[in-house]
Image: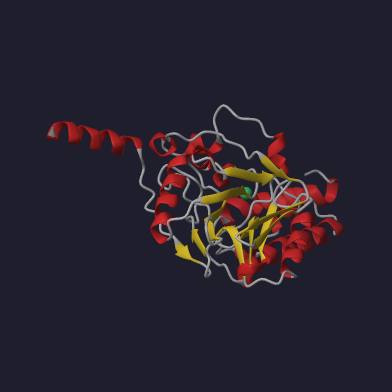
Amino acid sequence: MKSLLICVVFIHSLLAFDYNLKPEKVSAETHCFFGLPEVMDEHNNGNMVNSCFFNMGTSYLVIDSGPTYSYAFQAYEKMKKINNLPISYVINTHVHDDHWLGNAYYEELGVKIIGSNEFSNETKVEMTRMQKRISPDAYVKTRQVFPTIFVNDENVLNIDEKKVYIKSVNKKAHTNSDLLIHIPDGKIVFVGDLVFNDRLPSIRDGNLNGWIDSLDEVRTMDVDYIVGGHGEIVDRTSIDMTYNYLKMLRDRVSMLIEDGVNIADAVNMLKMQEFKDVNFYDSMHRQNVEIAYRMMEWGSE
Ligand SMILES: [Zn+2]
């Protein structure tokens, strides 16, 4: 019996990675699991993204399901210890796979999953980006489960007499379609990867003008909390790093283009030292300058 038990424990430890997740209280109703300021690898196993739970009263609303099945399972186990509530909906802010690969777990629970309209164009891939980079024991049971409810313009949920406004940004910003989840009762908006505050954002899948416009819109909202997809700052200043970086990038690249500087020289010249201590500066900034130049000079995105 004892050897059987040891065997079971051994197999279990082979099959599951413990993310050691800790829910952090963000507001009266909100807890988030904040990811590390790193790229996904076999050490963090995708725990480099935020996943948040909003207590509606008799259920949780989940914003982004995290990087794997086992992450989602472990996050909900931790949340049940705070309040043993069912989940009303899971919302996926956008199509990047660190934000939604936990969906399979919630689907098994029978939870409906809402996502940005871009998911309707997505097809399942042979191997996800996450799957290629993290360890197989963390990826166990993870499947590509897309949302079944898409947001074209705005969907409004009414849960426990609280309204949840799920708005599509309606222009290319961080991706082709990003969602804002605004809960006026909680004075909070979840903005997905429109806001990074622990690393430089990548503009590769987005559009500079659309992204800056969408942040201008978020700035006008009557909220106390703005929760991004990466980073632990959740008050109204959470937006500042991304916003200032994108605006400076746009301004400086446009000046270089006006001055007739070619793309290779622009990439070498435009250092934006103010951001050099931000995570990912070394790996991301030059690429962002190049993409920004292409977008602004030739309209290629
Ligand atoms: Zn993203």
**Left or right position of 248 against 52:** right
Q: Identify the residue at the far left of this view.
A: 2
In this view, 123 is above or below 78: above
In this view, 214 is above or below 145: below
Residue located 75% across and 59% down the image: 214
Q: Where is residue 290 in the image (x, y as percent from the top left)?
A: 72, 49
**Left or right position of 130 against 285:** left
Residue located 53% across and 47% down the image: 65
Q: Position of residue 16 (x, y in %)?
A: 35, 39
Residue located 70% across and 47% down the image: 175
Query: Can I make out residue 271 in this image?
Result: no
Q: Identify the residue at the far top of this view.
A: 126
Q: How many marks?
A: 0
**Left or right position of 170 against 50:** right
Query: Can I make out residue 241 in this image?
Result: yes
Viewer-side residue, 37 vs 148: 148
Colouring chosen for the image of the structure: secondary structure
Q: Where is residue 159 in the image (x, y as percent from the top left)?
A: 62, 57
In this view, 19 is above or below 27: above
Q: Position of residue 287 (x, y in %)?
A: 66, 49
**Left or right position of 97 against 86:** right
Image quarter where the C terminus lies is top right
Quarter holding residue 135: top left
Viewer-side residue, 184 vs 232: 184
Quarter holding residue 14: top left
Image quarter where the N terminus lies is top left
In this view, 168 is above or below 14: below
